[in-house]
Image (cartoon, rainbow, N blue to C red):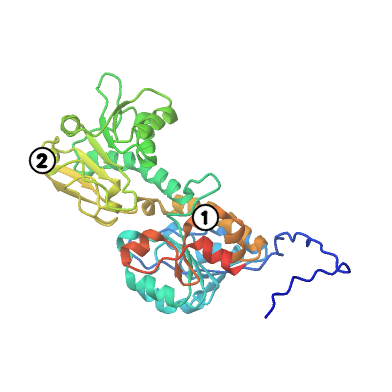
Amino acid sequence: MSSQKPFVSPSFTYETLEETLDVKPKGAELFIGIPKETSFNENRIALTPEAVAVLTANGHRVVIETKAGIGASYTDNNYSEAGAKIAYDRKEVFECDILVKSAPVSEEECELLKPNQYIISPIHLAVMKREILQKMMAKKITALSFENLKDDTGHNPIVRSMSEIAGSAVMLIAGQYLSNANNGKGVLVGGISGIPPTKVIIIGAGIVGEYAARTALAMGASVKIFDNDIYRLKRLQNNIGGRLWTSVIEPKILAKQLKSCDVAVGALSGDGGRTPIVASEEMVSEMRPGSVIVDVSIDHGGCFETSEVTSHEKPVFTKYDVIHYCVPNIPSGFARTASQAISNVLMPLMLETGLDGGIDKTIWHKINIRSGIYLFKGSLTNFYLSERFDLKFTDLNLLIASRR
């Protein structure tokens, strides 16, 4: 067969097509459900009545399970006045398109999920199970986690707020257990004229460490901070705006300081994995009788070797005459403040989602929200989870692009 030359006719005109722009669609009505949390020690609720009032005023529907806000001192009446529908049957809440939770999805809740639902909740890696992920994948769920949600500045707003609450609460908790009322040694945290100030050691210079240091300094205590990240120590000094006693975590120096302190705070973050143990059992055994350890990093295993998980009902135990407070989820003990902090992040996100025309559109337009998505229509898009549970990982950006 002879090869033909390409035929070009002069009667055709060849023109480039006009560029088509990605126009944002008209807004969508969101159908949001808030179930009552049944998990251990969870008192927070992810949307406050004030936030619900804003959402309903913007034409969205909110269904909330009866008594869901009770842990944060919000009544059903508060929510119904804000325009939410109160559901007396749990199943009714799970009929909503979007579920907003302040605790991770539990196994019994997996059964109630409907296909293609969208869930906003924490993950809590420590208690995450492979079966839960698989059930959610089978139902083609899209899920956004509190821990990984980033704002426009690249920070994690919910984690930051919870860390601020935990950090600020640390000194209030320590003060409680140093007083005689709780069989403490009767020391006032801080200092008064003529008496040397209480000595506070903080291990970890992240957000929790910074807020614990602020509160301790405001009370008049003497504060010493340990962290292996020099940048963090510098940032903490700059943020607090004064010269602080800081050190890298060097066992001999740490042991010497723990010996003479009244309060020790564990505030190391365990970037994804377990927190390293930096204070050994021997160091704790040398501490003063009646001193207090508050291990905030117990969520990720704790940084004191003697730490064991406690609950809000029985928050402390004593070992080597040292009082240990190791309650995970400290913000849940200040549930109303914590609920307002979570709600302040989620309510604007929901409004934006409505204006964008639904979740899928928001994920397309807002790149920073993608870091929080760990399931997209049943595909696992979080690399850490896929490695940990040996499940197939799919790149979210590719998934989104392929759907346009």
Q: Is residue 61 visible?
A: no
Pick the quarter of the image with the C terminus.
bottom right
Reading the image, the residue beneath label 2 is 282
In the rendered image, residue 45, in percent from the top left (x then y), is placed at 46, 60
Q: Is residue 17 visible?
A: yes
- Label total for image: 2
With respect to residue 217, does 309 lie above or below? below
Reading the image, the residue beneath label 1 is 343
Residue farthest right in this picture: 11
Pick the quarter of the image with the N terminus.
bottom right
Judge left or right: residue 26 versus residue 242.
right
Q: Nearer the viewer, residue 270 or 263?
A: 270
Quadrant in the picture for residue 192: top left
Secondary structure state at the residue bearing disc 2: helix
Residue farthest front in this picture: 2
Residue type beneath disc 1: Ser
Q: Residues within 10 Å of mark 1 (few under 14, many from 20)?
A: many
Residue at 37 percent of width and 39 percent of height: 206
Residue farthest bottom in this picture: 1
Q: Nearer the viewer, residue 323 or 272?
A: 272
Judge left or right: residue 7 versus residue 328.
right
Residue type beneath disc 2: Glu
